[in-house]
Image (spheres, helix red, strand yellow):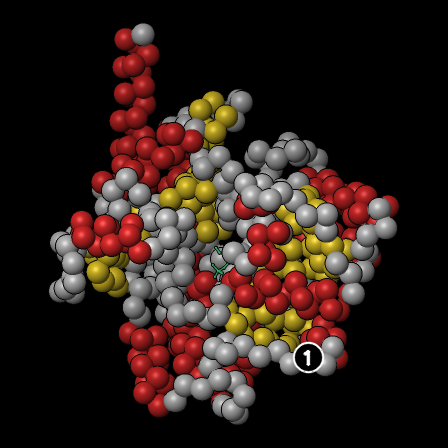
């Protein structure tokens, strides 16, 4: 059993003393101290096991032996920066290239999703020589200053919107401006981007890029209506801009049927830049920007070297290669399709039983339950969602909320999540929601 240096209370006290308080803890009222993990399970200081439905970073499972072995062997041998020639970086780039459309064939390795998106911003601006960026409502693209500027989820609470940033409606067919009963939501939402671009141009400004997550997660586990990305890419390119697909959360097979979530749009759709991070190193800081030869050439032509001290080092690339091997060997994409599909079916059954579940949506192991107080009004059941998260924790299952009203329960577990895990999650939600509705009925009766 892993041992603690300090008792939990002392760790918490030291955390409060030494760590910036804007770095929040999960379950801040009663934080959890985790000492070890394996697969989809986390263990606290008492050895209590928790089922992890939220760690999308530990993609192939916590502490996967093949990944830890690859890291430690390479670490014992060599770790340098990318100015020395090494096989790992080129092998890894070639492996990634095979997962992407032919057009996307040049890679820059970085250390985090934020670094990837910041570099994507630079690439797009260098290539287009334009400045402005179009993003989706509620989007989050990272914590660097440049990315706070293009993340409405953050800048709304901070300094506000920069004049070069333009926010398009979130194509959310449950809660957005065009709903599931609209005859052509993808066209309508894409047209809203087109009119935004027209407005930008009418002010004499020019668009460098449209940034969007292929499945907006912070926005509430949104599935973009099919056809939207293709049309938006057409409008953005016609305006001289590029399409940047942020796959930091959604890449590496999470959607099951495809390696990249943007591929759900169909064979013919290809972004100009793809950014990736979180699952890529299974917890090791490894991220990347992939783009076309033309965009990369424009970046080279500016004559300024791009050097990233840690990005693409032999250890990181060994880890990345091991992650790709595990995804293939353990058929984790197939698992995401099967287990995610089963969980989705179970949740849809629960939706029939519990009116508080307004919508269940998702693909593969990227799922969300939108909780509402009233199905007609679709008013967000924020408190009830928080209650569900807390009760699930009592049952030793970690889930969390997302969406602008924090009323969407999200599931992005390690990809080794099993059928039994899915059944346990659905059973537990059923019990908690049944109890909740009984309590609400009793309260209504008393009033
Ligand atoms: C969609 C998306 N893009 C970018 C980032 C930034 O990644 P990182 O935290 O690795 O810098 C995040 C992080 O949550 C994200 O969810």
Which of these two is toward me, 104 or 35? 35
Placement of 226 over or under 268, stated as above or below: above
x 25%, y 62%: residue = 37
Residue 110, visible in the rendered structure: yes
Residue 123 placement (x, y as % from top left): 68, 68
Foreground of the two, 408 or 143 = 143
Residue nearer the viewer, 58 or 329 = 58
Q: Residue furthest top?
A: 447
Q: Is residue 84 above or below residue 267?
A: below
With 116 as the anchor, is 129 left or right in this view? right
Residue beneath disc 1:
304
* Residue 162 against residue 147 in the figure, above or below: above
Front-lying residue, 318 or 40: 318
- The spot of residue 304 in percent (x, y) is 68, 79
x, y (%) of residue 170?
A: 62, 42
Q: Quadrant of the C terminus?
A: top left
Which of the image's four quarters has the N terminus?
A: bottom left
Q: Which residue does the image show at 54% across and 77% down from the upper left?
A: 308
User: Would residue 181 be found to the left or right of residue 12 on screen?
Assistant: right
Q: Is residue 258 visible?
A: no
Q: How many numbered markers are drawn?
A: 1
Q: Position of residue 415 (x, y in %)?
A: 38, 60
Residue at the image position 63 percent from the left and 65 percent from the top: 120
Dividing the picture into quadrants, the one containing residue 278 is bottom left
Q: Residues within 10 Å of mark 1 (few under 14, many from 20)?
A: few
Secondary structure at numbered mark 1? loop
């Amino acid at each position: 059993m892993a041992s603690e240096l300090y008792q939990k209370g002392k760790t918490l006290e030291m955390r409060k003393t030494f760590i910036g308080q804007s770095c929040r803890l999960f379950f801040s009222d009663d934080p959890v101290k985790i000492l070890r993990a394996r697969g989809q399970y986390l263990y606290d200081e008492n050895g209590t096991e928790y089922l992890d439905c939220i760690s999308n970073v530990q993609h192939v499972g916590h502490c996967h032996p093949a990944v830890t072995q690859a890291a430690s062997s390479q670490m014992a041998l060599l770790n340098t920066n990318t100015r020395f020639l090494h096989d790992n970086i080129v092998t890894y780039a070639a492996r990634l290239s095979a997962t992407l459309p032919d057009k996307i064939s040049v890679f820059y390795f970085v250390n985090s999703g934020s670094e990837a998106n910041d570099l994507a911003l630079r690439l797009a601006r260098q290539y287009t020589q334009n400045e402005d960026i179009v993003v989706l409502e509620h989007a989050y693209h990272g914590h660097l200053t440049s990315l706070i500027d293009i993340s409405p989820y953050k800048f709304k609470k901070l300094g506000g919107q920069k004049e070069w940033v333009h926010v398009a409606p979130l194509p959310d067919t449950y809660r957005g401006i065009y709903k599931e009963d609209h005859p052509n939501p993808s066209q309508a939402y894409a047209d809203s981007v087109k009119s935004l671009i027209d407005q930008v141009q009418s002010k004499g400004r020019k668009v460098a890029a449209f940034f969007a997550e292929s499945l907006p997660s912070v926005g509430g586990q949104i599935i973009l209506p099919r056809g939207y990305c293709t049309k938006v890419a057409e409008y953005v390119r016609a305006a001289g801009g590029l399409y940047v697909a942020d796959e930091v959360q959604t890449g590496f097979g999470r959607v099951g049927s495809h390696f990249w979530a943007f591929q759900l749009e169909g064979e013919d759709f290809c972004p100009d830049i793809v950014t990736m991070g979180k699952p890529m190193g299974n917890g090791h800081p490894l991220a990347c920007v992939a783009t076309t030869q033309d965009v990369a050439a424009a970046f080279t032509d500016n004559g300024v070297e791009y050097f990233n001290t840690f990005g693409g080092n032999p250890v990181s690339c060994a880890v990345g290669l091991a992650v790709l091997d595990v995804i293939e060997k353990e058929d984790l994409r197939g698992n995401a399709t099967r287990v995610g599909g089963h969980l989705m079916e179970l949740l849809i059954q629960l939706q029939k039983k519990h009116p508080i579940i307004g919508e269940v949506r998702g693909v593969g192991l990227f799922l969300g339950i939108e909780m509402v107080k009233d199905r007609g009004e679709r008013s967000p059941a924020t408190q009830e969602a928080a209650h569900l998260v807390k009760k699930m924790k009592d049952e030793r299952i970690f889930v969390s909320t997302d969406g602008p009203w924090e009323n969407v329960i999200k599931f992005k577990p390690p990809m080794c999540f099993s059928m039994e895990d899915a059944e346990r999650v659905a059973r537990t939600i059923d019990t908690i929601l049944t109890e909740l509705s009984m309590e609400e009925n009793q309260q209504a009766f008393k009033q």
